[in-house]
Image (tube, rainbow, N blue to C red):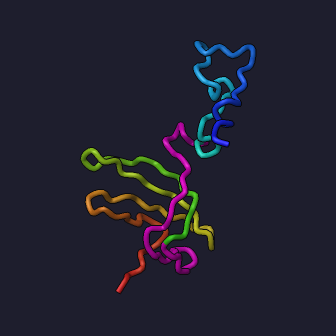
Amino acid sequence: MGERKGTNKYYPPDFDPRVHRSLDAYHGTHALRERAKKIGQGVIVIRFEMPYNIWCGGCGRHVAMGVRYNAEKKKVGMYYSTPVYEFNMKCHLCDQRYLIRTDPANFDYVIVSGARRKEQR
């Protein structure tokens, strides 16, 4: 089953590797397909898992740790040599959007807008 991926590449007669460089460039697609729709803006769609419990700012409902979202990931800065990323996702219970940023200094995530962190006691 694993060998089928490498052997089934069709190269059209007008494909020139010096001109097109790759089959993706020839077809005008990106290797990440729909996930790379906004790649020109520096945004890629990833699967993000909520790192802790939060309260939604729109509907006020509880969103549990481990709930997964399709989030837009964007690099917004650097902390020394470590990149700082921002994740933008929509609440699955309402239309509120969460903005969560990595915090490499404290090895944590920070909620920038759209929600608040649930205090664990």
Residue 54, magenta (yes or no): yes
Quadrant of the drawing holding the C terminus: bottom left
Q: Is residue 13 left or right of residue 96?
A: right
Q: Is residue 102 left or right of residue 43?
A: left
Per the rendered image, the range of residues in magenta is: 37-65
Q: Is residue 1 left or right of residue 106?
A: right
Image location (x, y in percent) of residue 69 = 57, 62
Image location (x, y in percent) of residue 36 = 58, 42
77, 109: nearer the viewer: 109
Q: Residue at x 47, y 61 (%)?
A: 99
> How many labels sit on residues?
0
Residue 39, magenta (yes or no): yes
Image location (x, y in percent) of residue 38 = 57, 42
From the viewer's perspective, is residue 87 above or below residue 38? below
* Quarter occupied by residue 61: bottom right
From the viewer's perspective, is residue 13 above or below residue 68? above
* Quarter occupied by residue 4: top right
Q: Is residue 3 left or right of residue 104?
A: right
83, 98: nearer the viewer: 83
118, 3: nearer the viewer: 3
Q: Residue furthest bottom?
A: 121
Quadrant of the drawing holding the N terminus: top right
Image location (x, y in percent) of residue 113 = 45, 66
Q: Residue at x 47, y 57 (%)?
A: 87
Q: Residue at x 67, y 30 (%)?
A: 7
